[in-house]
Image (tube, helix red, strand yellow):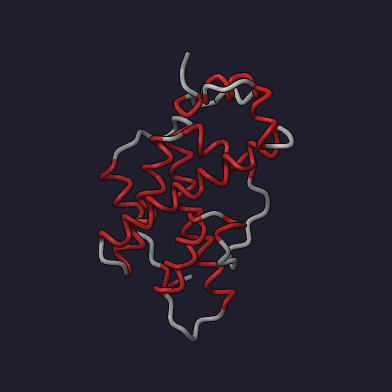
């Protein structure tokens, strides 16, 4: 049986989750009141892992515009490597507040997006323009990741880099 994290459309039943974790299904209820609470926690953990990888990539690139480009590239690469987690995230995440800087609510990945936008855009830029820029950047990398995951576009790291680098947030 394929691990849940490796499946394109995983079986997220409690029994399958418990089996993968090596515990009984009833043991899961000791930590989570219901399946939805467990899936919400898994989605937030996935967002935090993605965000951690993005932060590492941004620091390695030296921050600034190059760091923000690496945040986007890492998003696509992580999605390709973790398709089940990406699908879980967006099955569970409700309306997103791109102005939030609370990672406990939105996950570390959204905090990385917000940090990158704030770092790249002038201090006198309106909050609305920063929100538009964040939505633009997120839409680009998420759309590209989904096109790859759904088989419309073949994954090519060089192509991903070129597409992400082509983004000019100054025009948002």
Q: Is residue 110 above or below residue 169?
A: above
Q: Residue furthest bottom?
A: 124
144 relative to 14 in the view: left or right: left
Report the label total. Answer: 0
| Front residue of 31 and 35 | 31
Left or right side of 54 for 157: left
Residue 157: % across, % down: 28, 42
61 shown above or below 3:
below
Residue extending furthest toward the right: 33
Q: Is residue 35 above or below residue 116?
A: above
Please tell me in which quadrant of the rendered image residue 10 appears: top right
Spot occupied by residue 27 in the image (x, y as percentages of width and height): 65, 26
Q: Residue at x 35, y 33 (%)?
A: 154
Is 59 located above or below residue 83 in the figure?
below
Q: At 43% across and 81% down in the image, what residue appears?
A: 122
Q: Residue at x 38, y 35 (%)?
A: 81
Q: Is residue 33 left or right of residue 161?
A: right
Q: Nearer the viewer, residue 109 or 28?
A: 28
Residue 135: x and y in percent read 54, 60
Residue at the top extreme? 1
- Provide residue 7's location: percent of width, then percent of height: 48, 24
* Residue drawn at the location 51% of the way across and 25% of the way down: 4
């Amino acid at each position: 049986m394929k691990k849940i994290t490796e499946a394109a459309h995983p079986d997220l039943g409690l029994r399958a989750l418990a089996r993968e974790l090596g515990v009984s299904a009833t043991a899961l209820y000791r930590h989570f009141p219901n399946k939805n609470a467990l899936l919400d926690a898994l989605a937030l953990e996935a967002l935090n892992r993605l965000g951690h990888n993005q932060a590492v990539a941004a620091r390695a690139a030296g921050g600034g515009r190059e760091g923000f480009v690496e945040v986007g590239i890492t998003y696509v690469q992580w999605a390709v490597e973790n398709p089940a987690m990406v699908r879980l995230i967006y099955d569970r995440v409700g309306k997103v507040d791109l102005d939030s800087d609370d990672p406990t609510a939105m996950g570390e990945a959204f905090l990385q997006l917000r940090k990158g936008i704030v770092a790249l855009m002038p201090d006198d830029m309106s909050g609305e323009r920063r929100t538009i820029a964040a939505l633009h950047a997120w839409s680009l990398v998420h759309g590209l990741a989904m096109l790859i995951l759904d088989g419309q576009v073949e994954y090519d790291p060089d192509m991903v880099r070129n597409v992400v680098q082509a983004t000019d947030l100054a025009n948002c």
